[in-house]
Amino acid sequence: MAAPGCIFHRTLTRSRSGPHQASCPAVCRESLFVLDVHRYSRDQGSSVYFPQAVLMGDDLYDITLTDGDCRLRVTLDPGLNRLVERNVLQPGSTLRNATFTPAMAAQLPECTGVSGEKDSYRLVKVEVTDEAGGEEGGVRGINVGSDSLPWFGQTESEGSLLPLRANRSVFLPLWNSVDYSGEEWREAPPTDEERDEEEDEEHRPSVTVSELRDAFLCGHRSVTRGTVRHQLIVRVINKSHLMYYGKPDRNCDCPYKAVLEASDQTGSVCVVMWNSVCLTWYRCLKPGDIISLRHYRVKQHYQAEIDDIEISVNSRNPAARISILPESSVSPEYVPPVPTYSFYNSEELSDRPNGDVCDVIGLLTFSGRSERIRDKDGRGAELLEYHWLRLEDGASNWPIMVKLFSTSQPESHNKLHPLSVVVCTGLKVIRAADRTDACYLTNTTYTQVYCTGLGHHSEMKYRKLRPVRQFLQWLKSQDDGQVLGRALIGGFFIYPPPPVSLETYMKERRGEPGFLRGAELQREVERLCYRERRTYCIQATVTMVTYSRRGEEDRCLFWMDRASSLSPPSTSSSSPRLSRSSPHPSPSSTPLSVRPPLSSSSSFSPTSPSSSVGQLTPSRLERRPSRKTRKRKQLLQTDTPKKRHPRVTMRPEPNNKTVILFEASMEFLENTNSDEGEDEEDDTSSYVTAPLLPVFPLVAVETLPMHYDHARKEDQAGVVAMGGKATDDGGFDFALEDYYTLRLKALSDSVMVDVVFLPHSSFALSPPLHHHSNTWSSILSHGAFSSHTPPPSPADLITMAAQLANQRLVCVLEACHLGGAKTELILSRAFHLTV
């Protein structure tokens, strides 16, 4: 029992004046800390707990709070769900002015944290403070022993945590509905207390797949309507991801299913695991395992094109009996066939047709950040989590690009660091009908991922196949330093690259919504959930172009169109700025009505009466100390700069240049992992800038790709993962540090939109395909500099920006909400509109 002087006791005991008297809200003026956030889907009875709330969406959230003395679980009012959906309220957040209302106690007596009416509360109003965990005495300080803190209102905790406002036995992961979440999902098979007495004898099936199929299709009642008790021995060939079917109109406490493709020597069959069987067996079973099944039902296969069967395995009616059998324990004449694989290398994939299913192995050299897209158009649809992988196998100069969605293997996805050897099975080829340069692979229902660091490769049958051995031979010839030079993690990435002509782009976009007005774009961006990615189109003109370097945004080059520019906002923000311009701005509202001081060595005269080019330079007293112990790189160069070579973040010992790759390949024999590396930085001079002009959003840390640092791989992975923490002082080596910002003025309603433009990103992440004249028009339509000529210097490009004045453009914007107040808007293409 918590001490009577704790914050919860002082605040919440006042909310109830008596067991049968009206209850009133309680406001906590002191700081509370969020320990955990749990998501689950509501059921038919959930609305009882929220009599005055509008239940929008299927999700509910339980929040675990602490005041430092004890813990309390409360339910978030559905009206506050957006705080979680946009990753504002998260573990580690500090809450102030939290308003609680007493709620009907959940009808789950075994649920930890609920011990009667007085302990059941709903959080209906709150202020969330960012980054409070770093404060002295903050949540980081109490997180160390948070599990030992008592629960408010009870003497001890009993059992597992369960949802407070729905009859569900498990929680969902926060960011997708495919992975499992919680300790209830068993990693090891249960002990079989009902083993056969003749357990030492060889196992023989009492029925085969073909016999079951024939009996069912012939209508034998013992198979069609009863429980089949005969032992079936099959091998798991493929395993699907978890499928969650919980809906507000269903009360199933564990609404999961998973499908196994299994076979014996007589044929193959689908085995469907239902509900709590998934909790017990999903993580335990893997392709290649031999299993014994008893007490199951045979049903019509609901997806088969012709009459076929599936085996239904449930926890009751009947309670299925499952066990994993060592191959040596099965009678040799009944050993099921082993799984087959269809490995293709990067050269062979170029000839595979669209939709073909294949397996690949490669060295991971780029691991993109986690993002989400909607399964279906419209609000309320399920969000699917994915990230991009770039695999190299030495068979060609083209990498294998994989758009990898969740596969119910969160532990594997968390280990997908660059320089890992990755095997993906059950991928399908995606190829545009009229484009030969845009082939990539993505998931099927049965996609599985295996990577170094978890011991997968030494257990799987594929390790002895010829394509795998050929890849390992190539891997042995690779040098760690050379691979590290091109290994990247995170950052904005788009693939396949959009077309370079407006006509082709609009043809591919057929059937999708058309152009948005500026205000409509603003509303759409505000609706995005955390890491949700969407593409939008607007018609606009460019009113300002700036060139900046990350961390040095107070030193920039800029061009501004006086005729159509407006005053910038008074404060800078990392979220996109959308502001309405006045049709006839007064001179006092034009940023260039007061010219910033220009350095004589790097100033530019106006290129036209209606535009200006300048450099922002701060006074000496306004110089900010560098966060990194290095010299700053020179921002401007009078000559065209030489192309930057990738920097290496780790140097192996001179006597062993393949430490990481060698140990990664060794996992095919035994499970080993390496963890060594060092970081190096370079840099140059210093700059000065700007009073107040211009103001534009800073580029987010998540936007720029990082050079992979093997010594800090966990920190880098934490930045790019869902719910990861991105800090400006992480000290990471970014592959791209300079970027352009364009201020767009929507033609429809004059709303201003600030967008980031990365014309050099394609050099780092994909093979060079761009060949053009490096004018602004060609750079914007290709989304990148030409790969066949040196790129123009930033000074030259800003000087040429006057070409954009009064040009009508069709702008393709990639939006991604990065959490909290940060939303990324990237200009991927801009096409000149001639009509």
Image (spheres, grey):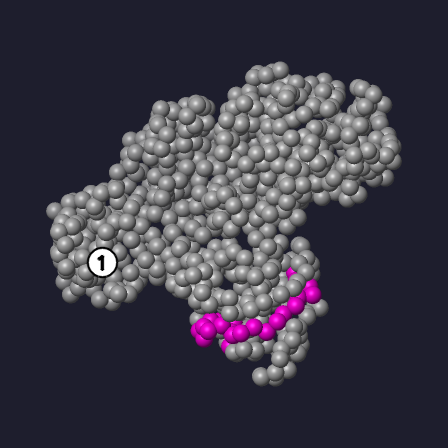
Q: Residue at x 62, y 78 (%)?
A: 23
Task: Give the quadrant of the N terminus.
Answer: bottom right
Q: How many C-alpha atoms fall within 10 Å of the one at disc 1: few (<14), some, or many (≥20)?
A: many
Q: Nearer the viewer, residue 71 or 373?
A: 373
- Residue occupying the point 84% across, 36% down: 589
Residue 601: x %, y % from top left? 82, 22
Q: Is residue 311 magenta?
A: no
Count of all numbered marks drawn on residues in the image: 1
The relative height of residue 233 versus residue 139 in the rendered view (above or below) is: above
- 44 or 86: which is nearer to us? 44
Residue 109 within the magenta-colored segment of the rendering: yes
In terms of image quadrants, where is residue 458? top left
Which kind of residue does numbered mark 1 sit on? Arg
**Residue 577 placement, left or right of 285:** right
Q: Is residue 16 above or below residue 647?
A: below
Q: What residue is shown with label 1?
A: 297
The residue depicted at 31 percent of the width and 50 percent of the height is: 259
The image position of residue 801, as x and y in percent, is 72, 23
Q: Establish if 581 lies above or below 15.
A: above
Horizontal side of 711 relative to 252 (left or right) equals: right
What x and y, as percent, mark residue 684?
Answer: 72, 30
Quadrant where the C terminus lies? top right
In the figure, 193 relative to 91: above or below?
below
Q: Residue at x 26, y 56 (%)?
A: 312
Whether residue 501 is visible to the viewer of this picture, yes or no, is yes
Q: Residue 9, located in which quarter of the rendered image?
A: bottom right
Q: Position of residue 481 (x, y in %)?
A: 51, 30
Q: Does residue 644 show up?
A: no
SS of the residue at dot 1?
Answer: strand
Region in magenta: 94-115
In which image quadrant can residue 110 be found? bottom left
